[in-house]
Amino acid sequence: MIVLFFLAAYLLGSIPFGLMAGYFLKGIDIREHGSKNIGATNVFRTVGKKWGITVLFLDALKGWIACLLPHCFGIADLPTQITLLLGVAAILGHTFPVWLKFKGGKGVATSLGVFLAICWEATVATFGIWILALLITRIISMASIVAVLTFPVMVAFFYWGNPDVYWLLPISIFLGAFILYTHRSNISRLRQGIEKKIF
């Protein structure tokens, strides 16, 4: 059953809501427009603001649902590490979807949903920092980088002394490094001063 849940989490994460938004709303393949990424930011720029926000919500929702899949089948009280790994499977599905030759989004929104399901206090605090960074810089990639660097600190602050921290902290660091890797082109543009502002 656990193996099936991991497979289901990956497939759920691989649903390309951004790509679908481009096709159904504008008749375009957003992989050929803007940053050529299927994530919410590119939808925001190429399809429209409200649809970018909608895709952000849907991408986060699939991460959240992936963590709760066992509960939907009456399986409760799973160890935190299993729930975390289900979330990781959804994030990998979003970033490396089998349907799109393993070229997907950058994993930020799906990670948001995963950690809202598991450690909402640290996640909400980090999301607040993401919003603040976005308002200051007006660059989504910069806000995302600030958030992934901040999140492990928030996990340590809210969960220090809780046995779950021994799983939450290393996985938050691992996913932070992974998201920095998926943002390597953004980091290059930031260093050159040519990364686009969102407003």
Image (cartoon, rainbow, N blue to C red):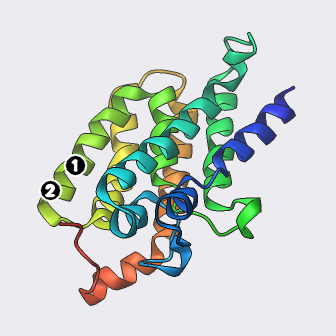
Total number of numbered discs in the rendering: 2
Q: Which residue is mark 1?
A: 131
Report x, y in % for residue 175.
53, 52
Quadrant of the image for the N terminus? top right
Q: Which mark is residue 113?
A: none
Q: Secondary structure at mark 2?
A: helix
Vertical side of 13 occupied by 83: above or below:
above
The quarter of the picture where residue 141 lies is bottom left
Q: Note whether 193 is above or below 197 in the view shown.
A: below
Check disc 1: other Cα within 10 Å, few if <14, some if 14-19, many if 20+: some
User: Split into 4 quadrants, where in the image is the C terminus?
Assistant: bottom left
Q: Which residue is mark 2?
A: 135
Instruction: Say which residue appears at 28% left-offset and 59% top-offset.
Output: 143
Going 67% across and 21% down the picture, which residue do you hit? 79
**Cα distance, mark 1 to mark 2?**
6 Å
Decide which of 180, 42 is in the foreground and name it: 42
Amino acid under disc 2: Leu
Q: Secondary structure at mark 1?
A: helix
Question: Where residue 7 appears, x then y in whole percent?
Answer: 80, 41
Residue 78 drawn at (x, y percent): 69, 18
Q: Position of residue 62 (x, y in %)?
A: 57, 39
Q: Are marks 1 and 2 in contact (CB under 8 Å)?
A: yes
Q: Amino acid at mark 1?
A: Ile
Q: Residue at x 30, y 57 (%)?
A: 49
Q: Residue furthest bottom?
A: 192
Compared to residue 143, the image places residue 78 above or below, namely above
- Left-right relation of 15 to 116: right
Q: Dot 2: within a 10 Å radius of its alpha carbon, few (fewer than 14), some, or many (20 or more) residues?
A: some
The image quadrant that residue 48 belongs to is: bottom left
